[in-house]
Amino acid sequence: MASTSNDRRGWILGGDAQCEDPGALPRRTWRLVLMGAPGAGKGTQAKLLQSTLGACPLSTGDLFRACACAMDDPAQCACLSNTMFEAIEKMRRGELVNDEIVCQLVSERAGCLQCAHGFILDGFPRTVHQARVLDDILKDRDVALDGVVDLVVNRDEVIRRLSGRRICSQCGASFHVEFSPPKTKDVCDNCQGELIQRQDDQPESVAVRLEAYEESVEPLRNFYRETNRLVEVDAAAAPGEVFLRVMDKILGRVPEMAS
Ligand code: AP5
């Protein structure tokens, strides 16, 4: 089992911030992208993959949520640009944030993509433009993706997953009222924080998110299909089973692992 202690400070804070305890280097450096509808299970699978592969889950949604928290704190709010305010408002409505700002944030964190621990990008790229920018960043650093895992789940199932999701207001841990309930209702198992519903998990925002996803996903799939990097996984199963399916497919792509 690989180390899972990395606090991802480098990704969340950007700039000169360093991860506090990146742990021992994994035996192999994995570089993966997870794509899939809102609620398809990207975050859930990123954590499972991290515990086995040692690669660091890097979510652009987490970046925007961290900025949204800063917006609610008067001491930090002054540091946010108008562009970031607009981006956070878009996220809250369920719309995609503009390519320009997403790509700028990721480019500023390019060091995380070069890290020897590897990465599991969760929710980036979401458009072909973002995918091309990612390719340029990686090419400049002479690193390549091992695969782009597309978690395929139907619309009814993602609505079920999103409407039941609850997150900890303190540590961000994710639960589901039906599929992975906390031991005590509305209380986080890890830190006893209060469990809340994400603002963009309200039905109006979910509808906007699904529409944005459905508009952008096919060109992105085609981009990765044409460059032989797309790995499609049927994600309509329990998280552990989906994880086994993902592992099976990605290990099969890497010659030294398949033998
Ligand atoms: P982001 O945070 O990336 O949200 P998302 O893509 O909508 O995905 P979610 O985090 O909602 O779901 P998930 O697939 O991670 O599912 P999870 O594992 O939590 O982005 C938020 C917003 O930021 C975007 O809407 C946009 O505004 C902006 N943004 C971010 N990146 C951007 C970009 N690149 N470009 C433009 N804008 C960007 O699972 C969901 C629930 O289901 C949980 O409760 C979980 O317990 C449960 N569950 C998971 N797997 C299973 C399973 N197999 N069976 C049963 N239940 C399961």
Image (cartoon, rainbow, N blue to C red):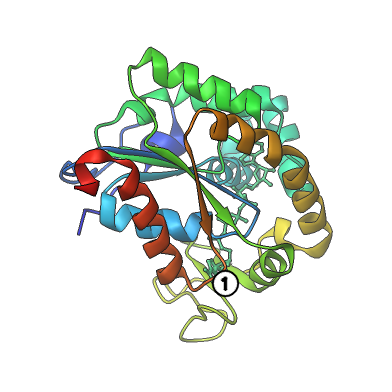
Q: Read off the residue under disc 1.
A: 195
| For residue 115, above or below residue 162 | above
Residue occupying image coordinates x 24% and y 48%: 258
**Percent coordinates x, y for residue 172 in the rendering:** 50, 60
**Percent coordinates x, y for residue 181 in the rendering:** 52, 81
Extreme residue toward the front, this view: 259
- Towards the viewer: 247 or 180: 247
| For residue 220, above or below residue 110 | below
Amino acid type assigned to the residue bearing label 1 in the image: Leu
Extreme residue toward the right, this view: 204
Quarter of the figure with residue 245: bottom left
Tell me if residue 101 can be seen: no
Q: Is mark 1 within 8 Å of ligand 1?
A: no
Residue occupying image coordinates x 49% and y 73%: 238
Label count reads 1
| For residue 229, above or below residue 194 | above
- Towards the viewer: 68 or 55: 55
**Percent coordinates x, y for residue 194 in the rendering:** 55, 72
**Percent coordinates x, y for residue 36 in the rendering:** 60, 50
- Towards the viewer: 38 or 172: 38
SS under mark 1: strand
Extreme residue toward the top, this view: 140
Tell me if residue 100 can be seen: yes
For label 1, count other residues whose C-alpha is less than 10 Å away and answer few (under 14), some (14-19) or many (20+): many
Give the image quadrant in which the ligand numbered 1 is located: bottom right
Left or right: 81 in relation to 233: right
Residue occupying image coordinates x 29% and y 40%: 254
**Position of the N terminus by quadrant:** bottom left
